[in-house]
């Protein structure tokens, strides 16, 4: 059942954007695009099925050539829209030129909005997003104002939908406005807030997955400064638990001291983006943190040089296997710490693998973002293995 669900999601994603298709193009790369119907006697039939490029036994790829296409693919995978209960309440349309809007806007994928996320090329709606929006047919959120579409920043204005607007003059003001919108939808402010650097996207990316899963807002600081808009947002939360993602090189000790006047502060992170994402995936505090230190989880993988993929992938962390976002710095290899982490949580069995638990990975982007060889390596590290036993 579980693996069949992943296969279905894969097919839906492929139907939405194709394998390797660009979000701004109507056409798809024919050498990478699986066919909808493949006959066994056709030349190239096995590659046209999209294997292993789209899926292996333990991974599924959303194979967009850019974050716009990835967002459309994820939206169709999470919301097949074949019935009223498989359609999203709303769609959050976010500017593809602003990774900060994407990371902060990921909170709109959480309850109560449960919005799909699509990306806009500034005021122009790309083909992939337009097609996905038509297919999703958002039903309308219960609040605020029954919005079917939430415009975040300077984005397209598709007609015929009940629309809410979120705007801000800079990343700090926009994150504050998103937080205020989420608070209005929830009816009360969250007791937890994530703070990240506005200047270090690779370290900020994992915040998007947690915001989508837990509904905790993401706010931004400079390395040595808490901007006025961020300070005002934190004051509205009335001494929240503040979790800072990233090392002192991104958010200094001086800034931590300033934040401590606004709430209780804990830092989570390491000196490079991959290790920092792993630290967050492992982290657990009462009522906060993924705590992924054992087998049986979903995981999401994205490249650090495509920070908008964090927003595109965020809805994958809200349902299904609820996985944290892990980041890779290279398309063609796994960072050593990431390989070791996957070994640490690799499933095992002693008698029958049917009674075991399983890990599954979602890969975001085409083979230029994460190569097929890297996908195969991840698949191997996620595979359930027979535990080594010793004779008494």
Image: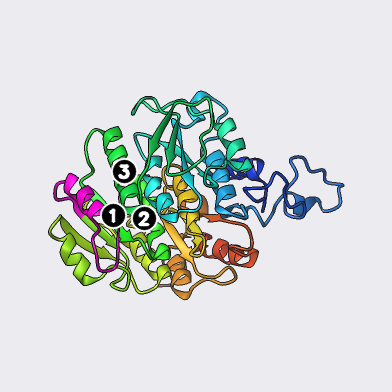
Identify the residue at horizontal 56%, vertical 39% (top origin).
Answer: 76
Question: Which of the pair 319/364 is nearer the observer?
Answer: 364
Q: CA distance from mark 3 to mark 1?
A: 15 Å
Element carrying mark 2: helix
Please report contact status of discs 3 and 2: CB closer than 8 Å, yes or no. no
Residue identified by numbered label 1: 194
Does the magenta segment cover residue 143? Answer: no
- Give the mark, 1 or 2, whose residue is nearer the N terminus: 1
Q: Is residue 352 visible?
A: no
Name of the residue lying farthest toward the front: 169
Q: Position of residue 347 (x, y in %)?
A: 46, 60
**Which of pointers 3 and 1 indicates the residue nearer the eye?**
3
Q: CA distance from mark 3 to mark 2?
A: 17 Å
Q: Which residues are magenta?
A: 220-241
- Give the mark, 3 or 2, whose residue is nearer the N terminus: 3
Q: Which mark is residue 207?
A: 2
Residue identified by numbered label 3: 177
């Amino acid at each position: 059942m579980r693996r069949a669900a992943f296969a279905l999601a894969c097919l839906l994603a492929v139907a939405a954007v194709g394998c390797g298709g660009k979000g701004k193009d109507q056409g798809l790369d024919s050498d990478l695009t699986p066919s909808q119907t493949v006959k066994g006697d056709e030349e190239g039939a096995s590659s046209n099925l999209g294997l292993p490029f789209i899926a292996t036994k333990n991974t599924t790829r959303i194979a967009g050539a850019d974050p716009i296409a990835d967002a459309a693919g994820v939206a169709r995978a999470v919301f097949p829209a074949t019935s009223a209960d498989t359609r999203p309440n709303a769609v959050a349309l976010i500017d593809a030129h602003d990774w900060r809007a994407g990371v902060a806007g990921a909170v709109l994928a959480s309850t109560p909005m449960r919005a799909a996320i699509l990306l806009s090329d500034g005021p122009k709606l790309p083909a992939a997003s337009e097609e996905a929006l038509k297919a999703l047919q958002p039903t309308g959120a219960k609040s605020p104002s029954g919005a079917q579409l939430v415009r975040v920043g300077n984005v397209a204005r598709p007609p015929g939908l009940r629309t809410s607007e979120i705007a801000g003059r800079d990343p700090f003001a926009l994150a504050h406005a998103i937080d205020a919108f989420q608070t209005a939808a929830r009816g009360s402010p969250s007791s937890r807030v994530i703070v990240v650097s506005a200047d270090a996207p690779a370290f900020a990316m994992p915040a998007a997955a947690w915001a989508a899963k837990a509904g905790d807002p993401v706010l931004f600081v400079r390395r040595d400064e808490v901007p006025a808009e961020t300070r005002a947002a934190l004051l509205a939360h009335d001494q929240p638990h503040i979790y800072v993602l990233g090392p002192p090189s991104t958010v200094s000790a001086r800034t931590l001291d300033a934040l401590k006047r606004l709430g209780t502060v804990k830092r989570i992170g390491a000196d490079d983006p991959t290790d920092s994402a792993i630290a967050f995936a492992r982290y657990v505090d009462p009522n906060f943190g993924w705590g992924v230190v054992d087998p049986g989880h979903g995981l999401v993988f994205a490249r650090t040089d495509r920070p908008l993929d964090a927003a595109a992938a965020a809805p994958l962390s809200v349902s299904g296997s609820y996985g944290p976002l892990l980041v890779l710095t290279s398309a063609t290899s796994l960072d050593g710490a990431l390989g070791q982490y996957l070994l640490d949580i690799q499933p095992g069995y002693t008698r029958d693998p049917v009674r075991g638990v399983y890990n599954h990975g979602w890969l975001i982007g085409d083979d230029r973002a994460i190569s097929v060889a890297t996908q195969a390596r991840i698949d191997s590290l996620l595979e359930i293995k027979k535990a080594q036993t010793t004779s008494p």
